Amino acid sequence: MTPINFIHCADTHLGKIQKNSSRRFEDFLDSFEDVVNYAVSENVDFIVVAGDFFDKRNINPDTFSKTFCILKKLKKHNIPLIACEGNHDKTFYGNKLSWMETLAEIGYIILLKPGYDEKGNIKYTGWNESNKRGFYYDINPKIRIFGLGYLGSEADERFCEISRFLFESKNNYNKFNIVLIHGIIKKYQSDFIGTISSDAVNNLKNCCDYIALGHQHTRYEHENFAFNPGSLEYWDIKEVKHDAGKKGFYHVRVDEAGKIETGFKESSKRFAIYLEVDISGTKNPDDVYFLIREKLRQRKQDNKNINKNINNIYEPIIQVVLGGKVTYDVMEIDTKFLKEKISEEFGALLVDIDTDKILFTRFEHVIAQDMSREEIEKQVIGDYVEQAGRFLGYEDKTTELVLNVISLSSASQTQDNCEEIYKTILNCDVKRKKIEPGILGTNNTQKSILDFG
């Protein structure tokens, strides 16, 4: 067969506006344009996109216009783009055309999707240039591309159904078969709707040469014939956790003997940091900020020079997920102010703070069996003073003061007792001192603490 040279990408999600950021809207377009530029520079035969070309079914004019301009480059260099629809691409019920079908109508992409007969079976129809429809497309006399798209819960059933088409194409016509599907092999992600069993995929191994997968945004490979490149950009910042945050596409080369060589190429993307921080042991919201800052500084330093394809390393997107157990009210963590402080220090384009995993727990007092009542009382009061987090460095003195006041106030309330309480406070050298709000305090008014001189 004639050697072939193509690119496989998926989940470009053009038009994605992450956290209402116009800059992120441009990032997704830029990543796809870089793939197109790479395709032109490498003089590839074609590009396949395995679904979720657009982020929404109803895209805005700006998305369509900029996508159109990028596709014009492929048109100019006679590089066809063959695609299938993902779950994000499908038209609304009742609409005649999706936006991908519109691009196919005007000749800028080849959109493959199965048609069905009156019994609901897939029709084995080739690409029709006049009506811009078809289940498969012949790039040349030896290469046939099938487009299944997103099948949801029917994925396994339809995979079995198309096997006879693939066998016919392979055995009768000696075709090199490529199948585009927007679906996930269950082995690699079981909690998605419409996953495909490994058995269903493996049954095609003798009749399909390359399965181009999409839908899952992180990369995986199956049995050296089914490949999922993942998304080009971070559709969700949590994706940074997987594969060291690598994003990209496959550059596939097939030699005359039909041997496949896949090279994963990292895409151009914005620098992103995903950080999980256990805030157990922090005594107040101010501690949380300093802990996050320290960990972010270390993470940014660790990742600074790892990937040359990272764009805008000085304008990252950052997601911090806080977890652990704290003894103060979680609502005291001012996430808005926290985002502002992190953005200011790290020059971040976006900062997202997730506090859903924080658990509030009441202070557990450690009481020994042989402790006297006075010792227990001191332990409990000391615990609460420490929990308050407002008397750092003066916990012992504060505990002593509270115990003295309690002891004196429990006596009969005579004038002599009141004077004694007053003298005790004076002897502790207690002064009222006004301070500014804490770094992350939610109260904008001034706070007071006991200051022991």
Image: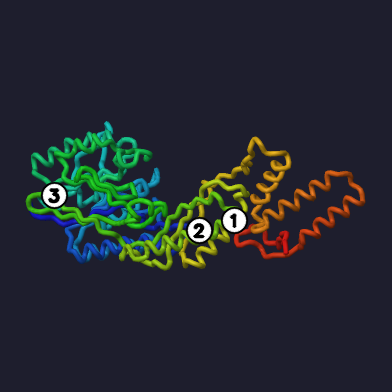
The numbered disc on residue 256 is none
* Mark 3 in CB contact with mark 2 (< 8 angstroms): no
Badge 2 crowding class, 10 Å Cα cut-off, few under 14, some 14 to 19, many 20 or more, is: many
Looking at the rendered structure, the secondary structure element under dot 1 is helix
- Please tell me which residue lies in front, 175 or 222: 222
- Residue drawn at x 61%, y 47% as measured from the top left: 327
- Please tell me which residue lies in front, 112 or 274: 274
The answer to which of marks 1 and 2 sits earlier in the sequence is 1
Q: Is residue 179 visible?
A: no
Looking at the rendered structure, the secondary structure element under dot 2 is helix
- Please tell me which residue lies in front, 171 or 210: 210
- Residue drawn at x 60%, y 53% as measured from the top left: 283
Q: Which residue is mark 3?
A: 143
- Please tell me which residue lies in front, 433 or 246: 433
Q: Amino acid at mark 2?
A: Ile
Of badges 3 and 2, nearer the viewer stands: 2
